[in-house]
Amino acid sequence: MAAQIYSGEKYASRRREISANLAKRPEFHDSKPLPFMTREEKILESSRKLTLISKHMNEIIDPSDKRELYHLNCEVLGIEGNPMALHGDMFIPALTAQASDEQQEKWLSRALRREIIGTYAQTELGHGTNLRKLETIATYDVDTQEFVLHTPQITALKWWPGNLGKSSNYAVVVALMIIKGKNYGPQTFMVPLRDEKTHQPLKGITIGDIGPKLAYNIVDNGFLGFDHYRIPRTNLLMRHTRVEPDGTFVKPPHAKINYSAMVHVRSYMITGQAIMLAYALTIATRYSSVRRQGQIDTTQPEVKVLEYQTQQHRLFPSIARAYAFVFAGAETVRLYERVLQEVETGNVSLMADLHALTSGLKSVVTHQTAQGIEQARMACGGHGYSQASYISEIFGVAVGGCTYEGENLVMLQQLARYLVKSAGLVQAGQSSKLGPLVAYLGAKSDSTSLIDRTPTPGFAEYVKTFQHIARKQTLKAAQKLFGFMEKGDTREVAWNKSTVELNRASRLHTRLYIVEAFVRRVEEVADPRLKEVLTDLLRLHVNYELLDVAAYALEDGFLSSSQLDYIREQLYFYLAKIRPNAVSLVDSWEFSDRELRSVLGRRDGNVYENLFAWAKASPLNKTDVLPSVDKYLKPLMESARASKL
Ligand SMILES: CCCCCCCCCCCCCCCCCCCCCCCC(=O)SCCNC(=O)CCNC(=O)[C@H](O)C(C)(C)COP(=O)(O)OP(=O)(O)OC[C@H]1O[C@@H](n2cnc3c(N)ncnc32)[C@H](O)[C@@H]1OP(=O)(O)O
Ligand SMILES: Cc1cc2nc3c(=O)[nH]c(=O)nc-3n(C[C@H](O)[C@H](O)[C@H](O)COP(=O)(O)OP(=O)(O)OC[C@H]3O[C@@H](n4cnc5c(N)ncnc54)[C@H](O)[C@@H]3O)c2cc1C
């Protein structure tokens, strides 16, 4: 099963080898539990481990393999980030996709050798979503052949970029490019921020950390201001866009080619989110198979809480989602890599499809992941609320994904634009022009779903029902938009009046895609035992997901109430059927205890002993009497007692 999750036996076994290797190297382990450390201590500890990784990486992994590097990071550095997180996640991808060969020679090679540390500085205090209205300006000075970076007002301060505050000495900065008074929109520039020897900010640069956040606090998200700060013309990233010495602008082959670093993260983060969801579910499912509370049969001992149908309903559909997401994530990464290669040869035809797909997936997956992690926390009762579970940290890190790389409700609209265009083609009788991701929009629905008409309906019946729902909502939302426009609204006003419905269409389209990705994967599985378990999980998934969106199919009679009853019964049947495999289904992700960092979710199941040992190690228990008691509480009680006398 691990081979299914990690797209092949080769990588699954490499993960095991890497974990086994690291188990023997205590210097790579957390020196104490992360929840017991201050933010400064965590940053120091993370930097220590980063240095070790840098020195010994070649002994442990193949550094050219992204997946091996990711696993090493998960084990050693964990999810709370590290001082070079953005260096790998965005700085290097931005240079790879946007710097010319000559620029790559100069900077990418240094970045890869970790001679410099970089980040991606785009968001500002006043603008994150609307990139066309960024306020940092890069004005071209033809005389000196330099760009002058400037922060004209407080809202133009860069704000949020990860590792900008304290760690990075370079950044790929996004600024509005002005040449001879003309605004050429957001462009990307390579900008030195700090002296390479002293690490002091360079003259003209104001820089710092933005303070603690909900989570992800090892990362020093930062602010940055420029005071007429000059960089050479050749620091504009020029793989696709160019500015000649005389200020002539050479257009790229696609207007949004500069957004590539964002598309990179959106493509990869689907897998990252699946893994964080699986962390929380591993902890909660293992704990639920140890925790005993209450009886189902009063003549029998107390049961494991995992026996309760409510607990199964709380956890198992999310286990299915984690599998669905990791399968969809692998497809997304493959498409991203393909598009990256094609863009290199000047073929930008798939950029719009990739953008639409990743915009929808990032939104739906992060939202459902956060929901699933929070349910996993509650499934652990009181102990879930303790940082010993580590689930609150996992939630905090994962839920950041709802905001970063494009706020979810905004990104759903990006997919909606694509869907509306496709709906326009259907309306114009040009369905043959629809791309493969939306071809279903042009197909005709059966008059009703056939879901309960055969003893065991195939997945095709479920897919058709999801298609019916997504198609109906897309065409309806597009119709609403077109209707407002016909009545005289501008497109923008009509769009705003239709966005709730348009975003619903985007979610339904994406959920259909996720179901299809799951079906595709299960169909490929050869081993019959594995296929059976995954088929059960997929059956749980399709029934659960369909119930969640059934209103759309009930309102036009595509599904009947008796079919709904059937779907519900199927769901309950598969909850019970999956129960014996539940722990194996989470164990199959093969997370080591070091990687999970959860006292509650350890493989040995000794929850109570481990929790007691953890509490005893809490810094507050170093002494029996805290200074705060000596200083305040004792005098308070004493004066209360004295006044009573
Ligand atoms: C095979 C198995 C392999 C598995 C391997 C897995 C191994 C490893 C696992 C790895 C896991 C890794 C986990 C990674 C975790 C990463 C953690 C990261 C940490 C945090 C990083 C956070 C960083 C940031 O947040 S950076 C800042 C991000 N900011 C944003 O996202 C801003 C959002 N706003 C925008 O993107 C834009 O402004 C937008 C798109 C909303 C609007 O743009 P604009 O106004 O310019 O355009 P529009 O007018 O709306 O549209 C015009 C037109 O352009 C199209 N378009 C827009 N963008 C794109 C694009 N990117 N590509 C293509 N086309 C685009 C748009 O659709 C419109 O098209 P029309 O045809 O006109 O409709
Ligand atoms: C953990 C974390 C890490 C980050 N790392 C980086 C980084 O490394 N580099 C970087 O540059 N940035 C980074 N960011 C910033 C991040 O990319 C932005 O916060 C994000 O893109 C959202 O933009 P915003 O903050 O301007 O939200 P806003 O756009 O102000 O959103 C506020 C609300 O307005 C709504 N809204 C906005 N526009 C529209 C619209 N057109 N239609 C409908 N509703 C709308 C949103 O849906 C939301 O409800 C990070 C953020 C976080 C939380």
Image: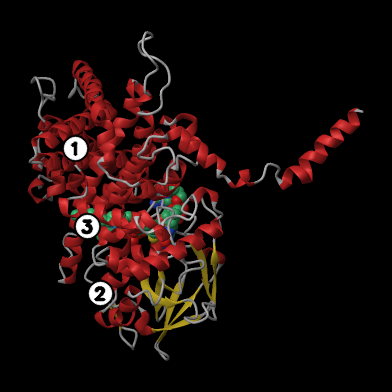
- Residue 29 found in image quarter: bottom left
Q: Amino acid at mark 3?
A: Ala
Colour mode of the rendering: secondary structure
Q: Is mark 3 within 8 Å of ligand 1?
A: yes
In contact (CB < 8 Å): disc 3 and disc 2? no
The quarter of the rendering in which ligand 1 is drawn is bottom left
Furthest-right residue in this view: 645
Residue at position x 32%, y 73% in the image: 112
Q: Nearer the viewer, residue 459 or 483?
A: 459
Name the residue tied to disc 1: 471
Q: Nearer the viewer, mark 2 or mark 1?
A: 2
Q: Nearer the viewer, residue 397 or 183?
A: 397
Tell me the tag on residue 240.
Answer: 2
Q: Is residue 386 left or right of residue 1?
A: right
Horizontal and vertical percent for residue 10? 16, 54
- Cα distance, mark 3 to mark 2? 17 Å
333 in relation to 47, above or below = above
Tell me the tag on residue 563.
Answer: none
Q: Amino acid at mark 2?
A: His
Q: Is residue 289 left or right of residue 427?
A: right
Tell me the tag on residue 352.
Answer: 3
Q: Amino acid at mark 1?
A: Arg
The disc, 3 or 2, on the residue closer to the chain's N-terminal end is 2
- Cα distance, mark 2 to mark 1? 37 Å
The disc, 3 or 1, on the residue closer to the chain's N-terminal end is 3
Rate crowding at label 1 as few (under 14), some (14 to 19) or many (20 or more) other CA atoms within 10 Å. Answer: many
Rate crowding at label 3 as few (under 14), some (14 to 19) or many (20 or more) other CA atoms within 10 Å. Answer: some
Q: Secondary structure at mark 1?
A: helix
In contact (CB < 8 Å): disc 3 and disc 1? no
The disc, 2 or 1, on the residue closer to the chain's N-terminal end is 2
Q: Is mark 1 within 8 Å of ligand 1?
A: no
Rate crowding at label 2 as few (under 14), some (14 to 19) or many (20 or more) other CA atoms within 10 Å. Answer: many
